[in-house]
Each structure stands twice: as C-alpha cells, then as structure tokens.
Image (spheres, rainbow, N blue to C red):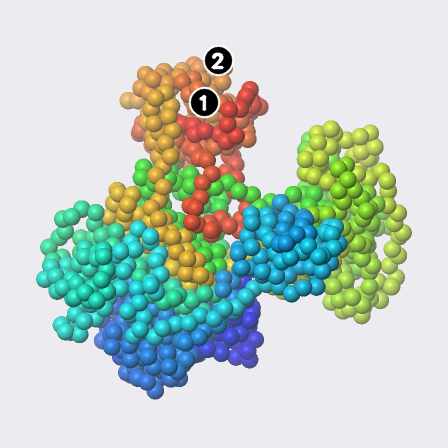
C-alpha cells in the first residue's frame, strides 16, 4: 500500500489475485506488533511486511546468541551480543517500501499492546500469553500466539468475542450455465455438462438470463441443496412459468460471524484443536498438554529441558501426567512428550518457516477479514525427522559449540550437521519457492562444508512484481539474473555457503551441462519450478539417475509438497493425473459462454495478428523452402498461412493489408473491428438463426450455446475506441509505423474510413464441434480451395522480392501497461463478451486470465519451503521407512491440512517378475576393450541374463528394430545413427533403449500416441562403465481423495512429455488392436556405448 492509500499494483501484482483490492485496502490501515525476534518471529515479520499492512513493530529485549543464527536469517555473527530487534530492523524495512517498520527493544507491556490492532507473541511465557491474551480479548485486539520447540510447533488465534469473516474461502463466486429447471417443489436445476457446478449445501445463488421461467431472474439469493455435480434443488417453482432456455446461476458469497474464546478459557477446550495429520490425533492432543507443561518446567528450572536429557524428559512427563488428571486423555502419547523434552532446545529453520507462514496468514486474516481464521489451536510436529534407528549419540554430541548451527545440533547432533555440510544439491528455480529454499539451505548449512556444494539454475531475470514474495530481491536488483542475486544474498546470510549460480533452462538443450557426471555427483535435487512440463522433465532425470527429488508448488493459499525417494516412493510423474483444461476450438471460435473463452480468443487473435503472421512473413522472405514446407501441412492450414503472408506484404491499394501510414493502421483496425464484432456474428446467425432447432427438435441456442448479437461501431463508446487505438498501434508496430493515443486525431481518421457493406453467404459452413472440424480436414479441400492455393503460390513467387522489409513480430508482455498489449486483450475480449451477453471482466481479472498469472503470496511459499526442508532432513539421514515421509496438501485460507504417507511405486509384471519405475537393467556396451555390442549381441545378452526376448526396440521416437534382420549385425550406435539420420550428440555417451518383449503378453507395440513408452535420456557415462536402465511408466489416474487441488499443476493445463530431438525415420506402426485405453509400463534398457 502506498502512502496515499492507493495500491501499488506493480509491487503487489500476484498477491492481489489472492487477496483482492478490498482486502488489501483494509490491511493498509492495520498496525501489527510482533513480539520476539528469534527465527520464528522474524519469519512472521518478513511475511507480514511483504503482505502490505500499514505498519509493523518488532519487539525483543533479548541479545543475539549463537543459537539464534540457526534460523534468524537477518542476524549475523557480527550481531552477537546486540539486541535482536534493533539488528533486524534495517533488513526488515528494506522488504517493502510501503510498510512502516520500527523496533522496540524494551519490555512488552500493556501500554505498548494497546497501540495495535493485531498482536503476535513468539517465544513467550504462558503467563504473558494469559495476561496479554485476556487484555487483547477485552479490548478487541486480535491476538496470536506462535511457538516452535525443536520439531514441534504451536499456533493459537483469538480474534475477539465476535469477528466477521467477509469472504470465507477467497474463491471466485461459482457461475454456471443452466440446461433445465423443473417446475416442481422443490425445483431442480440441471447445469450444462461442460463443468461441475462446485456448489455445496447451503450455498446461495441468484439467477439471470433465464427465459420462460423469468420469475427466477427477479427473486433474491436462493439457498440450494446439492443433488449431484451437475444439479441442485432450489425453492418451490411449481407456480412459475415453464422453463424455455438459457440462464446463469451465480453464487452469492456470504459473510459469517465467528466467536473466539480468550486463551485462558481455550486452554481447557480440547475441541478447539485443529488437526492436520490424522495419524497423529492422540499426539497433538498430548502436545496441547506438553506445551503447557514445558512452560511450567521453564518457570521452575529457569531453562528449557537439556538436549536429550533423560532426567529432564522424565520431569516433563510427570508434569504432563499431572495435567492429564484433569483433561483425562485416554491415549496419552508419552513418547512424544519425552521427544519434545529431548529436542526443545532446538531452533530449526524449516519448522519456523512452516509455522511462521501459517501465523503470518492468520495476521492477514485478522487485518483483512478475508479467509476463515484458525479456531483456535493448531499443533504440528515432524518427529519423524529424527533418526529411524533407536541408538543415538552421547548427550555431549548435542551440546552447544558456539556455532551458528547450535540450534540444529541440539536436535540432531554434531555428526549429522557435518553430514549436512557435505551434501551436494541441485536447486532448479530461484523464484519464490527457490528463494525460500535457499534461505533454509543457508540456515541449516546444506552444502556449506569443505566438500559440499549447491548449484542453482534459473533463466529468469528479476522483475518488480517478484519483490512482493521473492524476498531475497530488492528494487536495485531488477533486471539482474535471479540465480546470481539469490546466491549472493544467501551467502551474506551464511558466508560458509558454497553455491554456483547458472542461468540455464533445464531441458534437453542443457543436457550437455547437466549430464550423467553432474547428476551422479549429487546427493539430491530440489524443484522450485512453475510449469508441469519442467517438473515432469526434472522428475525423469532424477528417476534416471536414482536421485531423490524434493517437489513443492503453490496456488494462492494452496500448497503441495512431496519427497520422491528412489525405490521407496512413486515419482512425481507416476503420481500425476493427466488432465486437460483446453477449450474446444469451436467454443472459442463461435460458441463462447464464459469470460475465459473470450479472453483466450483475444489472446489467440493477438498471437495470430501480431506475432505468428509477422514471423511467417519473415520466414518467407529469408527461406526459399518456406512455401513448399507450408504446403506439406495440408491445404487448409497452407491457405491460412500463405494468405496471411500475402496480405501482409501486399499494399492496401492492391487489395492487401500492408499499411504505408498511420492512417492505414487506423483504417485496418476499424475494418477488423467490423469483421469480428459485426460481420462474423451476422454470418453465424445466418447459419444458425436465433430460432434454430436441432434434429431432435430442441433449441439450438440453449445450454452452453449463447445466442449472440452483432455490435454497431460507436466512436463515442470507450471500449470500441480502446480496441481501435490498441489494434492500430500494435499493427503499426509490426511495420515500424509510429502511432498515437490522441483520440481526437483517431476519430478524425475514422470519419474517412469506408466500411464496405456485408451480406452473409449461404455457402459458408460453420463447424459446431471439433470432431466435425477434424472430419472436414480429413476429407481435404475442394477444387475452389485448391485453385486459391495455386493462385497464392503464383502471387507469392512473382510479387515479392526476398529483399522486402522484414516485419517486427510482437511477444506478448502482460506487465507493461504502456505497450498496448493488455489494452488490446481487455477491449477485444469484452467486446466479444458483449456479443454473447457474457459479463465483462475488468483489466485486473483479464490480466490474470489472459496472462496465465498464478496467484501467489509469501505465506504459502514460506510454508511450502519449510515442509520441503523437513523432508530434506529425512533424505540426508537416509530414512528408508515410508512411514517417515509426508506428502502435504494444504489451504491456508480455510485451515485445511492433509499430511499423508506418500504412495509406493506401482509395480508391474513381465514374464513373472515384478518391476517398478526405479528398477534397472544393467548392460555394458563394450567389455574389457572389446568391440561394441551389436544389436544381436544385446538381444542375446538380455535373453541370457533376464530370460526375455526383445521383439521391438525404440530409441526416443525412432524404431531401431522391429524385425529388420539386416540391422542385427550392426553395433547399437551404428543403428541409432542410421535410423535417426543424425549423429549422437558429443555429450551423450549413454543411450536409453526401450524394448517390447515377446513374453509380455499384454504389451502392445507402442505407437506415436503412447508417449509412456518413450523414455528420457540417461546421461554421460565413460565407455566401459556399467549403466543403469529405467522402467518408464505412466500409471492409471489417481489423486489423494482428500486433496482438493494439486497446486503444482492446477493452472497449467494438460502436460505433454518433452518431445525428443530425434524424429522417427519411418512410420511408427499402430497397434493392430488395443487392450487398454492407457499404455502399460515398458522396461527400458540403458547401455553405455563407446562413441569413439
């Protein structure tokens, strides 16, 4: 929030899509006090400051100690002995220029508390919690307590006697198209089958655009009862008119009042515990008593229990048992109490990141009234991070060593700390999650030892919109590589870090850098990526090299994490469900019914007019084979592409569309407006009149088909002019013609534009479905189209010299408000929405949808990184029990948490033996200096060693063998080069070969539509070494039943496997019959083949 009350949309861009403008304005009036500036306190402060409240005051009387450096990322060794709050102030203030940050190094008292709307206590005594909690409750101040002790954490909220939640979940109101409404009591509403309605019992909706049963349009919000995913019941409609067609039901968001108990009362109420790991219900109920007992212990002993002291653990357990005489828990988890005692001295960065993210989100709720607050206790533990074996080092190995890792050594011991420092990890991505992971890596000392190392790669550069959640970056870093700035920042946090920053995209093109030797030198990989495709590719590389992978993703307040452990868990790709959110082409072209459709249409128009066509022109001008190559794509596509090229090169006087002046650009924009918003709609209505009926007698324009109407251009209409101004300027840009925003001048030009009359044609065919469109494509073009194509070929060959001026294609950039890109998208989409009576979208909403922006907020990012690093601690220790790991799904907006065990890898059987995607076949391509194996040698080796007969062999998408006897005597690398007609890249000394086996009765020959049988690459290995193979598999769709969203994938649509660099040299045969709709897993043999 800026000083004048306006929201800085450039800075808060991604967060605004989570919170919205109204919530952000409310936050901009709130002052927050955060007491305690150890690791947890600074994490909360960082997230709250980034979120954009009015002011934050940090309070702490304590002085910096060695143990603080384990998790307090703004304290350095030079701060030892100095006040924690004062030392943190400068770094905290630099996070957000719109937030006033101050430090209070004095004591916490009532006078200070009463100055704030929200108070957060960390590292506080129970006496202070009671005293200040009662004060805040009585004075209407929102009160939050957060605490971590070792591997256990606690969170408490009290927002007063009555707190209004204005928006319970933050989701966009549901809006569904209506197929039918019954005339009954109650009336039943049936929705169109293109999307589930997403409503629940008690939801309220309003109706609009209903024809026939128009009474629905005039009544207030109606409460619904869920019947099915596509239907719900409403009020009595028996006296209403008969339903005819159309209609939209739109959810009405409802506020609610929540009542809180003060902490003193809430301590006695076990029903207020919010569970997050349903395998730990007894443990978390026990922890509620154990944290109280811990306060009693500290009050008596003036210190926390000593690390791994049995006597102190026994004392704490005795206090818990005494408390339980009142509480009467049936299942007291005494082992958890003792472990809490053993580890309470610990101060762990990942724990603080997770609890700090949750606590900061509660602050945001308290300030904004957005989302459902915690009611009222939450306990979290990660005790499974401790060693799986019972034996533990001597108590002395956990004692403080005047080290920055003392807070971690107190939990895991000095030997584990040394192991952490020896780790070699690869972090892919240095954005929001990447920054948080690097912070945690620095604090725990990952790779900070003599033999340790971190490699981080990210191809992106810092933009202003990153600063709100990628907290390692500052305004002076804008334009610099993310990976370099992030690496430098964490080295300042921990000067012992050894980190190398790259700016490479992780894809097949970078396999020369991230090769076999690179991956085999790693202990593990962490993914901080934002696309499904990149995640799947990295996952495959980890499976190939048997490396563990940490994966996490966010979508607004939703988060997801998992650890991929070789041989123990399924991989990321194995656990993903295939899905598609692609909009049918016919819906986009002729039958839109949601604003998402019109926005995607506008994006397609932008790409076609201002990027793809200019690129095609430039290709034509510099590539003599362009026309012939285009013709090979089919007549319909060739007509569209070559027609666009000719129009773009031929001057307007000769019937083309090449402008020679700014006036020509305005003329083009005006005529384009007439074509798409008037003529095309009139043609559609000519083909399908408003009263059209289907072959079954039902109205054609019903359900998801909205009957459109043409628009008439009005130079005084703001949206009409916005389209012309943006389109004309963009069109001028691709020809190097300067434009203007001067509306008066543009209106004067428009007065001179001649708009030719239009008459709809009866010969035009408009496809109703994509299937119908494909059928027409397969039938091919008619004689008229072929004649037009021949005419175009002649014109292009004769008319335009290759020296013609190149055009300037435009790459869409959503974040520059001066470039006309979003101006065009918003106007184009809203005009089309007006055609179809679809509610328009404002610029903010349009930017999110058209720009495919993923909503993001720092709180979720911090929590995800914390959970990922807890899994990291398990990986470094080498945990091999699946019960030690957790896959997490959560939604901070509604305090929804599911922490579950990861899935084991699915096995499959070939010739009586079971395999998973982690299993290897080991083949040595050249033994003892002998000649390389021939294809026949390879098949014989597999037969002798595994009792399997290879019938088909693939390399990428190319078939190496499918019965061709002449290839059997050739070496494998010879066959690869012969079939692919390409040399094997110099960096690739290992090949991945995918066989089909005669013994596998269910295995059909893989075709081009079955990418599950096409492996990724195994990386470099020196000749003569043994290489491991992979079992590549795509398993049947499955998702955790309790998980409502997979945030790592949710906004990206269907993923595809990365296409191979090598194209098949012969057609891949289709299976003669299909026994299953999805491919089954295939083994792949990886062989080390000498190339020299």
User: How many numbered marks appear?
Assistant: 2
Question: Which mark's residue is nearer the viewer, 2 or 1?
Answer: 1
Q: CA distance from mark 2 to mark 1?
A: 28 Å
What SS does tag 1 mark? loop
- Give coordinates of residue 597: x percent, y percent: 66, 51
Rendered view: 333 above or below 767: below
Rendered view: 119 above or below 984: below
Quarter of the rendering occupied by the C terminus? top left
Quarter of the image where one finds residue 947: top left
Measuring 34% from the left and 58% from the top, which residue is drawn there?
275
Measuring 73% from the left and 40% from the top, which residue is drawn there?
768
- Give coordinates of residue 27: x percent, y percent: 49, 74
Q: On residue 1002, which mark appears? A: 1
Rendered view: 615 above or below 1: above
- Give coordinates of residue 502: x percent, y percent: 42, 51
Quarter of the image where one finds residue 752: bottom right
Disc 1 crowd rating (10 Å Cα; few below 14, some 14-19, many 20+) is: some
Q: On residue 575, which mark appears? A: none
- Give coordinates of residue 698: x percent, y percent: 75, 42
The residue furthest top is: 965
Residue of label 2: 966
Rendered view: 835 above or below 589: below
Would residue 548 be visible to someone looking at this image?
yes
In this view, the residue in front, 463 or 177, is 177
Measuring 45% from the left and 65% from the top, which residue is drawn there?
372
Quarter of the image where one finds residue 696: top right
């Amino acid at each position: 929030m800026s000083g004048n009350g306006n929201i800085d949309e450039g800075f808060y861009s991604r967060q605004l899509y989570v919170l919205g403008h109204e919530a952000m304005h409310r936050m901009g009036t709130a002052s927050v006090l955060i007491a305690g500036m150890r690791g947890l306190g600074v994490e909360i402060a960082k997230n709250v400051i980034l979120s954009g409240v009015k002011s934050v005051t940090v309070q702490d009387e304590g002085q910096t100690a060695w143990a603080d450096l384990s998790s307090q990322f703004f304290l350095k060794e030079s701060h030892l002995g100095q006040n924690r709050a004062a030392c943190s102030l400068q770094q905290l203030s630099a996070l957000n220029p719109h937030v006033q940050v101050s430090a209070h190094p004095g004591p916490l008292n009532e006078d200070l508390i009463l100055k704030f709307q929200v108070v957060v206590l960390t590292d506080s005594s129970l006496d202070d919690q009671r005293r200040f909690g009662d004060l805040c409750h009585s004075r209407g101040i929102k009160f939050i307590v957060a605490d971590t002790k070792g591997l256990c954490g606690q969170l408490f909220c009290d927002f007063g006697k009555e707190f209004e939640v204005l928006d319970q979940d933050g989701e966009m109101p549901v809006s569904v198209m209506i197929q039918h409404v019954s005339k009954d009591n109650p009336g039943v509403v049936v929705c169109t089958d293109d999307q589930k309605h997403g409503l629940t019992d008690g939801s309220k909706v309003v109706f609009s655009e209903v024809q026939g049963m128009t009474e629905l349009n005039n009544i207030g919000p109606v409460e619904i009862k869920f019947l099915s995913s596509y239907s719900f019941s409403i009020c009595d409609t028996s006296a209403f008119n008969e339903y005819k067609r159309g209609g939209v039901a739109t959810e009405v968001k409802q506020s609610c009042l929540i009542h809180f108990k003060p902490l003193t009362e809430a301590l006695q109420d076990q029903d207020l515990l919010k569970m997050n790991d349903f395998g730990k219900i007894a443990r978390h109920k026990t922890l509620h008593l154990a944290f109280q007992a811990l306060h009693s212990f500290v009050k008596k002993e003036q210190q926390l229990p000593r690390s791994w002291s049995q006597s102190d653990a026994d004392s704490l357990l005795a206090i818990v048992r005494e408390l339980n005489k009142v509480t009467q828990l049936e299942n007291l988890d005494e082992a958890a109490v003792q472990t809490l005692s053993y580890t309470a001295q610990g101060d762990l960065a990942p724990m603080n990141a997770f609890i700090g993210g949750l606590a900061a989100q509660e602050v945001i709720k308290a300030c904004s009234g957005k989302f459902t607050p915690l009611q009222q206790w939450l306990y979290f533990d990660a005790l499974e991070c401790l060693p799986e074996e019972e034996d533990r080092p001597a108590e002395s190995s956990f004692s403080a060593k005047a080290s920055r890792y003392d807070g971690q050594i107190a939990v895991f011991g000095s030997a584990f700390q040394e192991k952490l420092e020896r780790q070699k990890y690869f972090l892919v991505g240095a954005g929001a999650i990447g920054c948080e992971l690097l912070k945690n890596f620095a604090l725990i000392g990952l790779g900070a030892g003599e033999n340790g190392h971190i490699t981080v790669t990210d191809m992106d550069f810092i933009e202003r919109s990153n600063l709100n959640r990628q907290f390692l970056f500052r305004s002076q870093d804008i334009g610099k590589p993310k990976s370099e700035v992030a690496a430098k920042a964490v080295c300042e946090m921990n000067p012992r870090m050894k980190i190398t920053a790259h700016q490479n995209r992780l894809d097949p093109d970078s396999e020369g850098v991230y090769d076999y030797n690179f991956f085999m030198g790693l202990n593990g990989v962490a993914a901080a990526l934002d696309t499904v495709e990149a995640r799947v590719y990295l996952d495959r590389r980890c499976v190939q090299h048997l490396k563990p992978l940490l994966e996490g993703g966010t979508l607004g307040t939703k988060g997801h994490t998992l650890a991929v452990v070789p041989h123990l868990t399924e991989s990321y790709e194995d656990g993903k469900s295939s899905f598609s959110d692609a909009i049918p082409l016919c819906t986009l072209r002729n039958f839109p019914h949601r604003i998402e459709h019109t926005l995607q249409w506008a994006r397609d128009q932008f790409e076609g007019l201002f990027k793809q066509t200019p690129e095609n022109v430039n290709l034509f001008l510099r590539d003599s084979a362009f026309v012939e190559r285009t013709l090979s794509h089919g007549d319909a596509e060739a007509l569209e592409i070559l027609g666009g090229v000719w129009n773009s090169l031929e001057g307007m006087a000769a019937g083309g569309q090449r402008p020679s002046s700014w006036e020509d650009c305005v003329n083009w924009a005006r005529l384009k407006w007439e074509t798409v918003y008037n003529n095309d709609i009139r043609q559609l209505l000519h083909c399908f009149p408003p009263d059209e009926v289907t072959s079954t007698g039902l109205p054609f324009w019903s359900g998801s088909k909205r009957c459109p109407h043409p628009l008439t251009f009005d130079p005084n209409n703001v949206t009409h002019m916005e389209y012309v101004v943006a389109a004309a300027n963009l069109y001028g840009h691709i020809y190097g013609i300067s434009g203007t925003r001067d509306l008066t001048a543009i209106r004067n030009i428009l007065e001179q534009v001649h708009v030719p009359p239009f008459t709809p044609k009866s010969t035009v065919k408009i496809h109703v479905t994509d299937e119908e469109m494909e059928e027409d494509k397969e039938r091919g073009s008619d004689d008229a189209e072929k004649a037009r194509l021949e005419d175009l070929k002649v014109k292009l060959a004769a008319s335009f010299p290759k020296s013609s001026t190149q055009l300037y294609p435009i790459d869409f950039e959503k974040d520059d408000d001066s470039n006309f890109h979003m101006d065009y998208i918003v106007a184009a989409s809203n005009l089309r929405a007006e055609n179809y009576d679809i509610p328009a979208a404002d610029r903010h909403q349009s930017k999110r949808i058209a720009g495919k922006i993923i909503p993001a907020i720092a709180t979720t990012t911090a929590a995800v990184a914390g959970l990922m690093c807890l899994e990291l601690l398990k990986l470094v220790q080498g945990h091999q029990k699946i019960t030690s790991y957790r896959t997490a799904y959560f939604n901070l907006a509604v305090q929804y948490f599911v922490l579950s065990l990861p899935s084991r890898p699915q096995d499959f059987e070939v010739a009586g033996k079971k395999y998973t995607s982690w299993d290897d076949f080991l083949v040595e391509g050249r033994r003892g200096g002998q000649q390389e194996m021939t294809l026949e040698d390879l098949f014989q080796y597999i037969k002798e060693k595994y009792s399997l007969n290879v019938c088909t062999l693939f390399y990428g998408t190319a078939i190496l063998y499918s019965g061709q006897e002449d290839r059997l005597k050739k070496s494998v690398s010879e066959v690869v080069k012969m079939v692919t007609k390409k040399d094997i890249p110099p960096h690739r000394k290992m090949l991945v070969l995918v066989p089909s086996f005669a013994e596998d009765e269910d295995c059909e020959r893989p075709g081009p539509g079955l990418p599950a049988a096409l492996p990724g690459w195994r990386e470099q290995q020196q000749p003569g070494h043994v290489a491991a193979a992979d079992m590549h598999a795509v398993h049947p769709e499955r998702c955790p039943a309790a998980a409502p969203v997979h945030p790592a994938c949710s906004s990206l649509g269907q993923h595809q496997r990365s296409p191979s660099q090598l194209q098949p040299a012969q057609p891949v045969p289709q299976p003669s019959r299909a026994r299953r709709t999805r491919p089954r897993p295939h083994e792949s043999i990886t062989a080390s083949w000498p190339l020299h």
